[in-house]
Image (cartoon, rainbow, N blue to C red):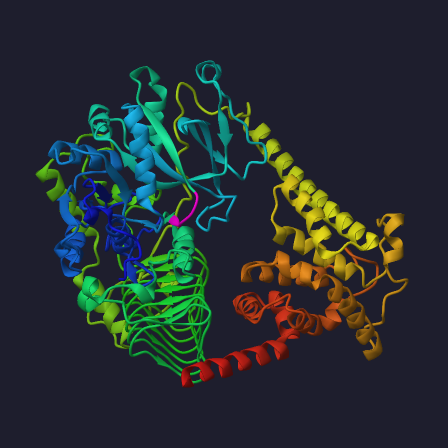
Amino acid sequence: MTSLLSNPAQEGNTVLSAILLADSFAQEFTPVTLERPKMLLPLVNLPMMDYTLEWLATAGVTEVLVVCCAHAEQVEAHLKASNWAQRKFMKLTVLTAAACLSPGDALRFVDQKDLMKNDFVFVTGDVVASFDLQTALASHKQRQAADRHAIMTMVMQSAHNTYHRTWSGDTETLVLLEPQVNRLIRLEDMDSSNSKKSTILDAEHFSGHNDLMLRTDLLNLHVYICAPEVLLLFSDNFDYQNVEQDFISGVLSEEELGNTIHVYELEAGFAGQVRDLRSYEAVSQAILQRWSFPFALDNWSVELHGAQSESGYGVKRHNCYRGQDIKLARTAILGRDSVLGAGTSVDEGSQVRNSVIGRDCHIGKGVHIHGCYIHNGVTICDGAQLQSAVVCDGAVIMSEAVLCSRCIVSYQVVIAAGHKVPADALISLCPHQYHKHASLHDDEVEYSSAGQMAGSPAAGGDQASHDSEQRSNQLPSAAVKAAAQALAQGRQPSVHVDFDEESVGRGGAGFAWPQHSGLEEQPLHLPKHSPGSHTSDSDEESVHDRDRDHAESVDHEASFKKEVTETFLRCVKMGYEQDLAVIELNGLKIAEDRTFADCARHVFASILDLCLPSTATCKAEYQSLFPPDAPNTDTQAGRAELLHRLSVQLNSWAPLLQRFLKSEDEQVELLLTLEEYCEEEGRIAHSQCCTFQAVFQQVLKLLYDMEVLEEDAIIMWADEKQMATEDDRKYLKKAATFVSWLREAEAEGSTSDDSE
């Protein structure tokens, strides 16, 4: 690819080394990772690890130790095939450590080899980054020159100052810092779903430091700049298995040794780790939308990836990437933020939106794909519908089959015609043999018979050989693969295999795996004491507490809605300009820790309210803003009057909604708010009967004409509704004519682009 970052190593600077761990020791991508390492899974049609290597290369790293654990032979083969080892300005050394069961084991293995003499960068192969590493390194060097005990610098970034795509929202990290030197004093994971978050600060923190800063907005980017002493500490402490959970907390709790850890806060640039399916999607979308530039599909080097190169992409408006030799039918639609890999064909009437399609795939007629990640050589037959799914190499989705949200279809699986795969399903040709160990991590599944617990020393060659044999026993047998291939081709297998028909349908091939148990990462260990979380004395009290917290959450949402409504009505009454209204609502947003999109939903509901008589709960000072009666929407004149009232309101306030609704997802949320309003008319807004239901399609068009809703957002909403139940498609049917018109207009635009 074209390198837009300088390479300081070529300018005579100090040699910079890195340890890249080609294993995450995680279970979120099981059963896919039984057959292929996570680091080689396609991320926007390129192996995940290649993004990490390319970033290290452009950042001036000249020596990289790649530590391979599970599937080491596949990682080595990929590095050789993709010519990474032949790069002259970056020396690549591959270390095979098949017996390692944790990052701590891997770092101890590196220390035993005595290869790392200078400071180094430690990163896993699932991190995608584009920020300037040299600035962080300079900060580390400067600090180390003043304090030789500064052994590690963590790279972190604020999740709130600028919206960070990869924040999962399930945990917040409490970071206690000494602000003058950004020294880390304490690190703790907190459950952000708990409305009552609390912690206990040790008095010793205040006695030993003049100034402390407590932050909850920082994300760990999983990039660490380390002194060689870090490896020694891992070797001296065999209970250190993870960097965050064990090593950092261990160093913080042993202040008497003098070692310190510091934080470098990233001000600009992108970084994200692919931890699970949600972050896989988030990082993919960031790449598609070019947040990770210069690491973009149309900017990769043919020389690097050789015959398997994904270069040669063209990029059109709305981030639509098209590989070489694709076949896109005239009536097929490639929506925004989507990729078609080289050699892929899409037949008549099919739609691909917010999705990545790999190489040499075939998509039949009338297929709907939304928010999916389809790997190489996949066949999707006529009429299939896929929503937010991952489909691996060689899989076949037969005609009229349906894949629901978050399901994973592994390699060469066949989903039978007309079969519906439920949400969160995991299907593989690997028979599941560990139901009683459903919560085990990938490495524990792969090594479960090895008799070695995480944390024990590496057992050497015999152990690795045993592990390799165990993994081979878990892979699909030749008979299973042959049967799946026959079924994919519409033939009867020569050998009967008892596939799980409940999961793949009659005529399908695959076995169901238990859904991921949802085990969360363990909270980071704290120095000297555990977090100050309250536990109930009995299960009954715990249930009571949860019910009470839920009730408080509902009350809090109702209170927020009331505050937004009254603030907006006050702006209307006082005749405020748009900018003043934004200031008023922004103050409320900050006070309640909400987003502008949250405000927009309630502002929009208030705009709809202003078209109808006031409710009994409306304050007297605002009643004059409402009309005295509701139009009779059973008549054409009444419907015209209601739309006129709404048009008047939107002429005044549509620009405010435009400012608040920046993304398609936020606009879809507004559409859902309109649905909810229409569904609950007569109960939440006024005492009249279904008024806006009668003009739902016209309201939708009005919002489109006023540029509150974009075409792509409406299409996205319609596509999502097509996967819903009959009742949930009620309003899609009301808007069918308008949505069809939008689709036809988009298809004509796509055809025009092709002709150009």
Residue 13 picture location, percent across and down: 21, 42
Residue 612 picture location, percent across and down: 83, 62
Residue 242 visible in image: no
Residue 546 picture location, percent across and down: 59, 35
Give whichever of 120, 526 is nearer the camera: 120
Classify residue 510 as left or right of residue 15.
right
Looking at this view, name the residue that lies furthest to the left: 461
Above or below, comparing residue 389 to residue 515 in the picture: below
Residue 270 lies within the magenta run: yes
Image quadrant occupied by the C terminus: bottom left
Residue at screen point 47% across, 13% down: 207
Image quadrant of residue 661?
bottom right
Above or below, comparing residue 256 to residue 231 in the picture: above
Image quadrant occupied by the N terminus: bottom left
Q: Which residues are magenta?
A: 267-271
* Dominant secondary structure of the residues highlighted in magenta in the image: loop
Image quadrant of residue 134?
top left
Residue 318 visible in image: yes
Residue 5 picture location, percent across and down: 30, 53
Residue at screen point 50% across, 81% down: 749
Residue 208 lies within the magenta run: no
Classify residue 108 as left or right of residue 423.
left
